[in-house]
Image: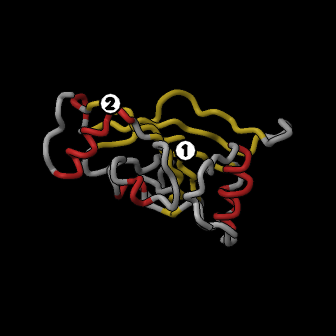
Amino acid sequence: MDYNYLGYRFRPTEDEIITYFLENKMRGNAFPVHAINTVNICAFEPWQLPEQAAIGDDEEWYFFSEHNKKYANSARTERTTRAGHWKVTGKDRQIWDKHGKEVIGVKKNLVFYKGRGSSAIKTSWVIHEYHSNNASAYQKPYVLSYLKGNLNEKDYTRAASSGHAASGS
């Protein structure tokens, strides 16, 4: 399917993200339309991720990624890249089914920080990470990540991808 049709937008609801896309991915079911790539989010910096997306514009992109643990027997998730890290912000938010009767998953909000430790600089790159409540039923638990870019950081992303320092504008 060609996604370049005028007016076409890929905007699934949170219920669809969990019950259709995420649950089917974990079951290994094929999708009739290829709209979301599987990507190791931490293998790329946020400004590199849009190139990995199946579709997306308007500074918004969707990805599946395996839910990788930081350590084998740990509940902590690996969220470090070469240039920085993704930090969970705020409280986890429960996602309800479309009828509002059952909690089907959780949404975590993450912000990208460039650098490490106390000198890390907060950026405007944000991921909304969706987890299914049924993830333990599958051999390979996945999360679905919805990445939002920032139009104000285009100079930074261009400079970062070319290896030059970002301009101050």
SS at mark 1 in the image: strand
Which residue lies under the disc numbered 2? 122
Which residue lies under the disc numbered 1? 129
**Amino acid carrying mark 2 in the image:** Lys
Position of residue 5 measured from the top left corner of the image (x, y, whole percent): 60, 56
User: Which quadrant of the structure image shows residue 151?
Assistant: top left
SS at mark 2 in the image: strand
Quick one: which residue is furthest to the left in this view? 164
Position of residue 163 measured from the top left corner of the image (x, y, whole percent): 15, 50
Q: CA distance from mark 2 to mark 1?
A: 18 Å
Looking at the rendered image, the quarter that the N terminus falls into is bottom right
Please name whichever residue, 17 or 4, is drawn nearer the observer in this view of the structure.
4
Residue at 72%, 50% (x, y): give it: 16
Vertical placement of residue 4 versus 169, above or below: below
**Amino acid carrying mark 1 in the image:** Glu
Vertical placement of residue 75 versus 26, above or below: above
Q: Is residue 66 visible?
A: no
